[in-house]
Amino acid sequence: MTRTKAFAFLLVFLVPLQMPLAAWLGSRSGWPNLMAWFPLFFLFVMLPVVDYLLGHDPVNVSAEKEREVALDPWFKILTLLALPVQLLLIFWSGSWFVRADLNLLGMAGWLFSQGLVGGILAINTAHELIHKDGKLEPWAGGALLASVGYHGFKVEHLRGHHVHVSTPEDASSARFGQSLWHFLPRALLRNTTSAWRLEAERLRKLGHSSFSWRNELLWWTALWLGFALAFALWLGPLGLAFFLLQGLFAAGSLEIINYIEHYGLERRRLEDGRYERTTHLHSWNSDYALSNLMLFQLQRHSDHHAFPKRRYAILRHHEDSPQLPGGYSAMFVLALCPPLWRRIINPRVQAFRPGAHPGRS
């Protein structure tokens, strides 16, 4: 890990910066309704273009340096910093939304933009934090998730998704041939209900009621309701609508990324009825340099599923993992058009399936 790359992870915070930039562009140009869509232009046009121009980063931290890098407080500080930035952003963004006098098209652009930014800043960073030991990082991850109302992810992702990934039991693993639009509403609903079921099962095994104060989802729900109440009292019905919708769009963006990360990949069922162990062969990988820096290396997802507690700075690129033809920004746009997605990605899935890939049986 070079010092340059370590500091380059600050590029994560370019994403929330797009919201005040869009407001500034709107006021300077006199086109606030058009500029409300600017963050989406940045994320889905400008970023993929620069990502392809800069190219790949397959370099891994050497094995002898991994522990030193993982213990460097810099990488922990960056993820914890996302919490105050996210809270400041959504309260400012909600205030601007209410006072900007946008038309319906401008409102839609601002809500979609804030939702996508929240999906990256809040949920993606929370994904890194909830995997860590101790209390501070998982707590910060839970608070980030509550800020977008998808706090069930804290339970379901760890106890559901990582257990059942790339099997029919996992709501966040898209089947081969399944369109995004079939997958998305089912993933949102199933993952939410699964989180409450998993937490109830945990408490029941400990001899407690699912409505016990020990149910962490009740606490995260209370925090989410507190946020919602604050928006309603401060900014009125429109402010409350902003808070609820930005959360829905953030959760939706997360599940679109889940669709991209696991589409069509399967773990074999063994003779004893269990599934094979999760390895770096069961998630799509992308080594595009810029988008990895701006996502805390989420795109090295293959290694993350093989070693879930590994800090983002030392996640490895695996050449033999299934490889996406672009970063997540480009793949996000591709997934929105199922015929085009299938045309480009299905041959890659078929080439990687058992019998078609060296080392797989």
Image: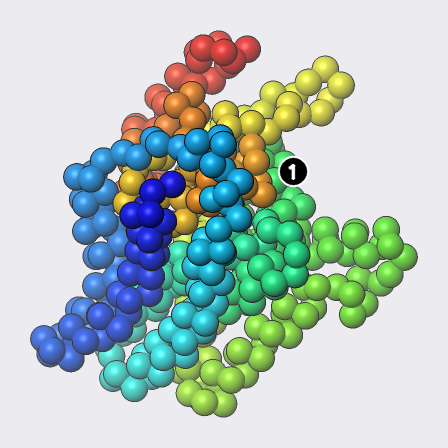
Q: Residue at x 26, y 73 (%)?
A: 20
Residue that carries the numbered disc 1 in the rendered image: 163
Q: Residue at 36% of width from left, 79% of height from top?
A: 92
Camera sees residue 270: yes
The kind of residue tagged 1 is: Val
Q: Is residue 36 above or below residue 134?
A: below
Pointer 1 local density, CA inside 10 Å: few below 14, some 14–19, many at least 20: some
Element carrying mark 1 = helix
Residue 254 lies, with reference to residue 140, above or below; the image says above
- Quadrant of the rendering where the N terminus is positioned: top left
Asked whether, in this view, residue 152 is left or right of residue 316, the answer is right
Q: Position of residue 210 (x, y in %)?
A: 80, 62
Pick the front one: 295 or 91: 295
Q: Nearer the viewer, residue 58 or 336?
A: 58
The x, y position of residue 315, in whole percent, is: 46, 38
Q: Is residue 263 visible?
A: no
- Return the x and y of residue 25 as percentages of the image width and height: 15, 73
Quadrant into which the C terminus falls: top right
Farthest residue to the left: give it.
29
